[in-house]
């Protein structure tokens, strides 16, 4: 709690907020801090997930992830086979966990970034996803594992100039493997790891605690754009939900409070036998 207050005070220091600012952290900050995973808390969390996964009752519930009205009248809908490029990519998208180890080109990397969160309107500042108040609270970091002509390290996607800012040039894959639950994802054969982060204040200064919801919604939008673009490029991708928040923040060289990681995304060339390899260009 003291650390949260210290970081919160620091972010408002000298910016004219003293008259109206309250010392107590917001509800959204408290929620985010209390849902972080650490090496210690992740053990209990992992044990809980394992317990849920071994329960036959819970398995049967999870096999039906939709609501059913059994006694209601029904209205039939038209058949919907894909009939355009976008629909074929949505239908083809699957979470891909095994990769070939082959490299991506820098052009493919650029397309993944631009069509996920790039500035697509050159006259204004609008981007590839809708954003509450056009505030765009997210950032994307790229950790290239096998990208042609790009050494390993941590890079930040610079939206204004559509380029990569070099955060650190060094191989940090082993550290990320200790901090993110890749489990059955073959990260050693992947081509790039993306990390979507949030600078919450961009949104919460205007929308207060409800802005936190908007930030999470936007992260989902960017993640969906990224995996659909990967599918369109014939690549495989997988979103990752489990990671040690503060350790990942340290690896990205962000503070974890004003800016915090939300969503890792793995992308690589699809290994034989995976769904995208079977659908391939035939889905285009």
Image: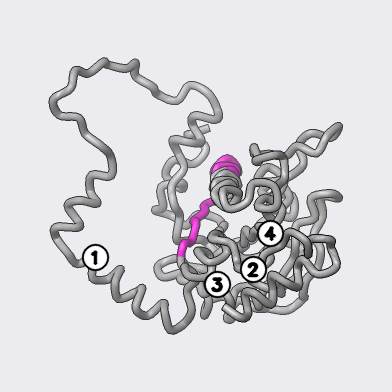
- The circle on residue 245 is 3
Determine the CA span between mark 4 and mark 3. 14 Å
Residue drawn at the location 55% of the way across and 72% of the way down: 245
Name the residue carrying label 4.
199
Camera sees residue 152: no
Expressed as whole percent of the image width and height from the top left, the position of residue 189 reads 54, 67
Position of the N terminus by quadrant: bottom right
Q: Under tag 2, what secondary structure?
A: loop
Name the residue carrying label 1.
52
Q: Quadrant of residue 76?
A: top left
Q: For the residues carrying marks 1 and 2, which lies nearer the camera in this image?
A: 1
Determine the CA span between mark 1 and mark 4. 33 Å
Q: For the residues carrying marks 4 and 3, which lies nearer the camera in this image?
A: 4
- Indicate which disc, 3 or 1, sits on the residue closer to the N terminus: 1
Label 1, residues with CA under 10 Å away: few <14, some 14-19, many ≥20: few
- The circle on residue 219 is none
Q: Residue furthest bottom?
A: 40
Q: Relative to residue 251, is residue 192 depicted above or below? A: above
Determine the CA span between mark 3 and mark 2. 21 Å
- Indicate which disc, 4 or 2, sits on the residue closer to the N terminus: 2
- Indicate which disc, 1 or 4, sits on the residue closer to the N terminus: 1
Q: In the image, 233: left or right of 56? A: right
> What are the residue bounds of the magenta stretch?
225-241
Name the residue carrying label 2.
145
Q: Quadrant of residue 147?
A: bottom right
| Colour style of the rendered protein structure | one colour
Expressed as whole percent of the image width and height from the top left, the position of residue 252 reads 68, 72
Residue drawn at the location 80% of the way across and 55% of the way down: 158
- Indicate which disc, 4 or 3, sits on the residue closer to the N terminus: 4
Q: For the residues carrying marks 4 and 2, which lies nearer the camera in this image?
A: 4
């Amino acid at each position: 709690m003291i650390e949260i207050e210290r970081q919160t005070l620091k972010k408002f220091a000298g910016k004219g907020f003293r008259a109206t600012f309250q010392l107590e952290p917001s509800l959204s900050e408290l929620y985010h801090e209390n849902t972080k995973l650490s090496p210690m808390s992740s053990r209990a969390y992992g044990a809980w997930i394992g317990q849920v996964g071994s329960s036959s009752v819970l398995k049967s519930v999870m096999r039906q992830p939709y609501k059913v009205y059994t006694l209601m009248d029904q209205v039939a809908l038209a058949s919907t086979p894909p009939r355009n490029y976008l629909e074929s990519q949505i239908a083809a998208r699957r979470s891909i966990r095994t990769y070939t180890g082959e490299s991506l080109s820098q052009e493919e990397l650029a397309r993944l970034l631009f069509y996920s969160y790039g500035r697509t309107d050159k006259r204004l500042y609008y981007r590839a996803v809708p954003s509450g108040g056009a505030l765009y609270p997210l950032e994307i970091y790229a950790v290239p594992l096998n990208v042609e002509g790009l050494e390993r390290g941590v890079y930040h996607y610079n939206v204004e100039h559509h380029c990569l800012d070099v955060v650190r040039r060094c191989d940090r894959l082993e550290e990320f493997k200790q901090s993110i639950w890749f489990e059955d994802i073959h990260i050693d054969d992947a081509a790039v790891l993306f990390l979507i982060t949030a600078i919450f204040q961009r949104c919460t200064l205007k929308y207060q605690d409800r802005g936190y919801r908007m930030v999470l919604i936007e992260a989902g939008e960017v993640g969906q754009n990224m995996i659909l673009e990967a599918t369109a490029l014939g690549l495989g991708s997988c979103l990752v939900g489990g990671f040690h928040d503060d350790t990942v923040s340290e690896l990205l060289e962000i503070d974890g409070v004003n800016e915090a990681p939300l969503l890792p995304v793995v992308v690589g060339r699809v290994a034989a036998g995976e769904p995208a390899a079977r659908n391939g260009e035939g889905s285009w």
